[in-house]
Amino acid sequence: MKQLAQYQDGRLELQDVPVPVPPPGGILVRTTCSVISPGTERMKVEQARMSLLQKAKARPDQVKKVIDTAKTLGWKAALEKVRNRLESPTPLGYSAAGVVVAVDELNSRFRVGDRVACGGAECAFHAEMIAVPDLLVAPVPEGVEDWQAAYTTLASISMQAVRQAEARLGDRVMVMGHGLVGLLATSLLKASGARVLAVDFISSRLQTALAMGAERVVNPAETRVEDMVREWTSGHGVDAVIICVGGKSSGPADQAIACLRDRGVMVITGIYDAELSWKTAYMKDIQVRYSRSYGPGRYDPQYEWGGKDYPIGYVRWTENRNFEACLELMRTGQLDLRPVTTRRVSFGDVLDVYNKLESELGVVIEYAAGRTGILPVTSDAGILPANQEPSRMPDAPASGRMPDPQARAFVPFDPARKTDKARRHLLHWEQEGVTQFVTFRQADAIAQEKLDLWHRERDAWLRDHPQPWDFETEEMYHRLFSERLEAWLDQGAGSCLLAREDAAHLVENAMRHFDGERYILDAYVIMPNHVHVIIKPIGEHTLSDIMHSWKSFTSREIKKAYDLNDGPFWQAERFDHALRSEASLAAKREYIQQNPVKAKLAGRFRIGCGGGVVSSTGILPVSGDSGILPATLATGETPVLHVIGAGNFARTMLLPHLKGKITLGTIVNATGLSARHVKEKFGFSTAETDAAKVFENNGNAVMIGTRHHLHAPLVLKALQSGKHTFVEKPLCLTREELSQIDEAMSSSTGSVMVGFNRRFAPATVAMMQTLQHIPGPKTLAFQVNAGVLAPDHWYANVEESGGRVLGEACHFFDFACHVLGRPVKVTAQTVGRPAVPDSVTAQIEFADGSAAQIVYSAEGDSAFPKESFRVFANGSVIECENFMRLSIFQNRKQTVKKFASKGHAEEMAAWLAFLKGGSPHPVPYEQARQSMRLTFAVLESIREGRGVAL
């Protein structure tokens, strides 16, 4: 499917990305319309186009985060995080409408085929398919068109501002700023019985405000607003002001206060940093209220993603009920959206719109049905059909109508013989009886901008190398241009319908149908978006005729099978290479055999051969099984790694150490945009949004970097499929989950490694080398200055994170076990009596008499080092700060060692060595299990106020 992507250098692109999957309790929607928010989206685009210095000035909070990261991880890691953030695409859009095509089993409100309005900057993107949680969706009533319903989220922003103003029948309300949100607020105020004065500097918007229901309008550049208000309200002032402007100027707030009556209400909507004149505001006793987005529930993950609605008796108007109210006003005609709709544009042409947003109000994007690259929904679950009916596939006779041996003999291209040079955009050299290597591809397999660049460069080269060509020049052409296109094809762009078994089977049957009659079919491979084939035409049949037959038949049948639009399925041009020697034949056969390996595919292809061209040595091609890679992969000698969840941490700290060192199979991320970005950056073969695809594929290893509540379920699935698993800490969130993993480990051929990277830090290794020569019990004192947790950080959602003690402090409990051995008892307490502790002091006893004190505190100052520890051991002291500076005190001497890693690179290297059979498992499961049991015991000790034996 296509999705609009924005980069931090200002680029906007329509990208092919995987289809998302419905979130728990949510739905999958085929978008029919979405609306651009001119204010918010224009601001995002303008910020993206800023220089790094301008970005730093605009976001000093982000600069501070970078500095804090540098203090903890070093400048290299900090800058890598910044680089990852800047090069990662971000989605645009948050107000859309469409048709439900899939429903999660936990959802009972919606059915496939329902028309819905969708909201949320985290999900309702400008994309052909969107996956949305239940409470960010509302059914569209009869009488409301899709383009109208697409305004629902934006209208709810205005509705929430009106509710915050508490405007009653007959109240006079001034609305400042008549962009889209201000205009919608004016219409809603009119519908509620309030009288509206519209204020804006743009005359055309004031005319639109009158059409939306404003009683009066005023342009501050022409008329003094205070004078207009005094005359309109008989000197009393307005009852409320809704500010719908952005920026930091004090002007709008001062003007609003001047125009308000005594004890009036000022409502701030959007990104406006208000500066209030204290004396006037105080003397009028005004109320200042901020209107937060679509209404109560916004930014509450329990509401939006957990599906926990607020009782109507306590919260009358939630964001979802605001959605429904807006849609009802559209149905009755009280909210007329025609005056604010200044442009309607097809999704394919949307990029140009973003350069002209300053002159637009409401821009409706329309999505053409059948142009999504998605197959039609036919199954009950609303997911793409697993297979079409076999009866729809033409049966091909088995290859083997063998003509006389002379017809099968390999004939090389001979420059001295008569050659037909067919041409469209590309040159095709056809010679009777000559064997050809041909590549043909789906129409959307290569992005148009890449093709345009390729054509420009090729045309320039052709001008310098006029035909006819000699052998060397032709070979140069293929190296410079044909091979480059093949590399692009192997990236797996476009809809990749040929990855579907039924579509690939159809193409394969078509190629084999006249094998031995019109041509000799040699080796072939059907890749997800293109086909490579070696073929020798027979008799009067030309390569052009054969290709036309294959393409026209398969295009028609695939379109019919999947109800696709009338656009081209195959690219009109093909790439062919007349083979000049038996060595070329052998090389192209090898290329076909290795193409899936080169493209890092673990499935979704078909390798085979027909009757085969016979060389002078009598050698025929060897047919491969469909979708199977060479035996080295199946036996585990060449591991394939799939990754589920690659956020900024994994992209910065883990994947760079794996790139180029292991075959990367499938990357799964929550959004198709991020999955596609990670695929291209690190070289994965496929990108998905459904983790289930990983367990269906070949490959013997999986990395799990999701949020914590998904760790245990995914580890269990990985073990059930026999995969070696790396999971970021924590391993699980409950003792019950740990027991389930214990049971799975007992019967699985896979393994589990938990991301306790501090074990692998070079400072840790150096310390352990010193400690191994010091006998007797030891004492460890570890202080973690974790800092205050921002309330909007995902760790604050305990159902996802498990809390900071379980989700992060487990690192340091594991470190204590690594240094001191087996724990036998722990006593722990927290600061105060919070429902979920984010600070802990734990005293741990070990089997050999050693002791550890772990202090994990959210109460410290960020200027103090984040992680520091001391080990006291039989006359020696070892001190470490942030795993970067290690001081060893022995024999009245201090030795200082400096390092630059917390162990992530070393951790990945150790796991890779295990996967490749070069070393034992770096963190045996029993050790990771021990650390998790200790973490659970710490929480139990806090809850029960006693020591807990392990």
Image (cartoon, rainbow, N blue to C red):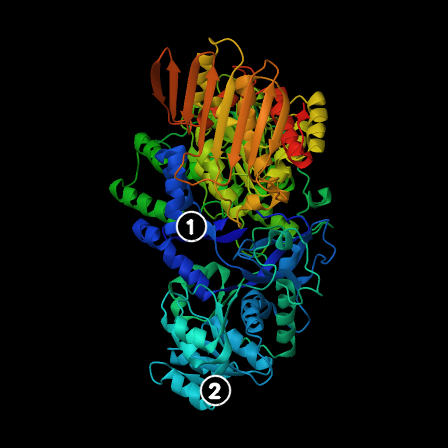
Disc tally is 2
Element type at mark 1 = helix
Please give left or right for residue 58 compared with residue 918 in the image.
Answer: left
Q: Nearer the viewer, residue 735 or 533?
A: 735
Q: Nearer the viewer, residue 701 or 1?
A: 701
Q: Position of residue 297 (x, y in %)?
A: 61, 59
Q: Type of residue at label 2?
A: His
The residue at the point 53 percent across, 50 percent down is: 792
Residue 350 versus residue 901 in the image, above or below:
below
Residue at the disc numbered 2: 236
Q: Position of residue 621 (x, y in %)?
A: 54, 23
Please give left or right for residue 356 compared with residue 777 in the image.
Answer: left
What label sits on residue 448 in the rendered view? 1
Q: Is residue 703 visible?
A: no
Other residues around mark 1 within 10 Å, as few (<14) / some (14–19) / many (≥20): few
Q: Residue furthest left?
A: 464
Q: CA distance from mark 2 to mark 1?
A: 62 Å
Element type at mark 2 = loop
Q: Position of residue 354 (x, y in %)?
A: 41, 62
Q: Position of residue 429 (x, y in %)?
A: 40, 38
The residue at the point 33 percent across, 81 percent down is: 221
Mark 2 or mark 1, whichever is nearer to me: 2
Q: Nearer the viewer, residue 362 or 859?
A: 859
Q: Type of residue at label 1?
A: Gln
Quarter that holds the C terminus:
top right
Residue 278 versus residue 484 in the image, above or below:
below
The tag earlier along the polypeptide, 2 or 1, is 2
